[in-house]
Image (cartoon, rainbow, N blue to C red):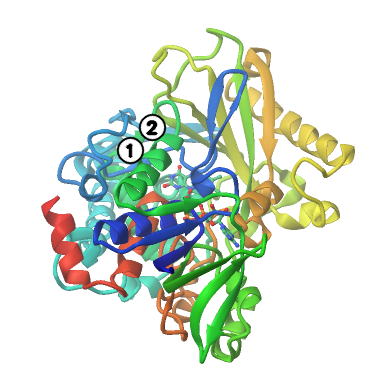
Amino acid sequence: MGFDVVIIGGGLGGLLCGNILSREGFNVCILEKNNKLGGSLQTFGRKACVFNTGLNYTESLDDGQVLNQYFRYFGLYPKLPLKKLDENGFDVISFDDGRYKLAMGHDNFRDELVQHFPHEKEALDNYLDTIRNICMSISLYTFSNRHDNVFVNKSIGISAAGFIRSVISDTRLQNVVAGNNLLYAGHENKTPLLIHALISHSFIESAWRIPDGSHQLVNMLADNILQNGGTIYKNARAERFVSVNDIIQSVTLSNGERIDGKYFISNTHPEQLLHMTESRKIQKVFSYRIRNLEDTIGMFTLYLVFKKKTFPYMNYNFYHYNQDNVWIAGNYDQSRWPQHYVLMTTATSKSDQYAESASVITYMDYNELEQWKDTLTGKRGEDYVRFKNEKARILLKAMEKQFPGITSCVEAFYSSTPLTWRDYTGTRSGSAYGVLKDCNRPLESIIFPRTKIPNLFLTGQNTNVHGILGVTISSVITCGEIIDINYLINKIRRA
Ligand SMILES: Cc1cc2nc3c(=O)[nH]c(=O)nc-3n(C[C@H](O)[C@H](O)[C@H](O)COP(=O)(O)OP(=O)(O)OC[C@H]3O[C@@H](n4cnc5c(N)ncnc54)[C@H](O)[C@@H]3O)c2cc1C
């Protein structure tokens, strides 16, 4: 007997689609190649500390806000533990000669920054109105029954950096409002205003951590699927589709097992499809485009375990730049690494006063890892360990300038590179957020959930927008290809 829907990948996108469809009575099966679900939402433990990998903070979870409504629908709210970041400064944007707080709420955000930039009050209002209006024009943001793809929005063809420069004249303030652009690997010449608006507006609405780890979100989503009668296979790497007349009948796993299904959803990077199917429909139309798509840059993450009661818990994220331009992804300079970093202390239910651990993230170009590209996690050799340790040392040294003595608080440290991400999530070149959206070539960088194969769909960060909110919206759009989207939006609105 086959499944109604076979979902390849148990990352956030796959788990959310599994939730929606199993709730609607579809017999769903999730195939996850790893022994843990969650993809980028996996956590890992070291020295009794839990580290998040790809969910450090999330957005718009106050009553009446967009992700709150989605979380209610998915049965996550109010069960999931949440900790609101500092309302008067959830992100601090730091330069060698000044620090600025990004506050929650549009008025609060403007008033906080007007203290530093009194001449830019009107510009800030214009900026905030524009990003809010863009979000309000997206039907899956407002839950209106006028469904359109997130990308059918003219702000996809406008440059975020260009827009900011057009409304704000002070260069420092231009950098401050885009200062957390690591959240979308902001590229000065390519990042669309749509991406900036969706992410910045939603975080300004409200910003939150999940105390004790993002695996709780993963576990809740997986439990829902099982309760709805779904099936989850871990250690199940999907390798090949078996098709008849371009309709997929089943997918073969690396252990040779065949999983039959009526519909198939891929939560993986779209390039994987090229290796999984011989369908001429996919190969002919998709191949050239997918192979030529650019991906977002990858990240180096340093995971710090602090000695007990030595380093304060910071209820905000600290973004530091050692230069005056915050758009680093497209201007990456290996010789000046790290040009920036973000420090995020981990929220736990144990203490609000001291941090037991923290993550520090900065970009890393995949080319720097060329010599280890044919190796696998844990088997890359001593020289790779030395490379990572040297990077950790350089990063900690850079942080000493803003946090004198931080190195002496560190009991142990661990690190990951884009190679780690490539191996864990299957993302090409260890890209952090998958396919790069380019305002100069919007249509070419948009991946729609519907493919040329009638029973194959795509979901996850590569299809629309990345991040928790972006992938949530993507999952609804994907499921809207199988069930009526307006029916679904109504259900979410009423949750
Ligand atoms: C360093 C970093 C920090 C981040 N921080 C934040 C943050 O603070 N807030 C935020 O909102 N977002 C953050 N993100 C982004 C967010 O984590 C991702 O956009 C989101 O989790 C992606 O989900 P996904 O389901 O699309 O993809 P993935 O998480 O990549 O899931 C894909 C899944 O498919 C599986 N898979 C791949 N190939 C196969 C196969 N052949 N067979 C079976 N399974 C397969 C993988 O193992 C994986 O589980 C961060 C990302 C990174 C890299």
Report the amino acid beneath label 2: Ile
Q: Residue at x 39, y 15 (%)?
A: 352
Where does residue 178 sit, x and y in percent of width and height?
A: 43, 50
Does residue 357 lie above or below 489 as drawn?
above
Indicate yes or no: mark 1 CB to ligand 1 under 8 Å: no
Query: In the rendered image, which residue does mark 2 sit on?
Result: 210
Say which of 448 and 482 sits in front. Answer: 482
**Residue 352 versus residue 262 in the image, above or below:** above
Residue identified by numbered label 1: 207
Image spot of residue 309 (x, y percent)? 53, 7
At label 1, the amino acid type is: Ala
Q: In the current view of this chain or complex, which residue is farthest to the front?
A: 1
Q: Dot 1, crowdedness within 10 Å: few (<14), some or many (≥20)?
A: many
Q: Secondary structure at mark 1?
A: strand
User: Looking at the rendering, which quadrant does residue 243 occupy?
Assistant: bottom right
| Residue 470 vertical position relative to residue 74 in the rendered view, above or below | below
How many neighbours does mark 2 have within 10 angstroms: few (below 14), some (14-19), or many (20 or more)?
Answer: many
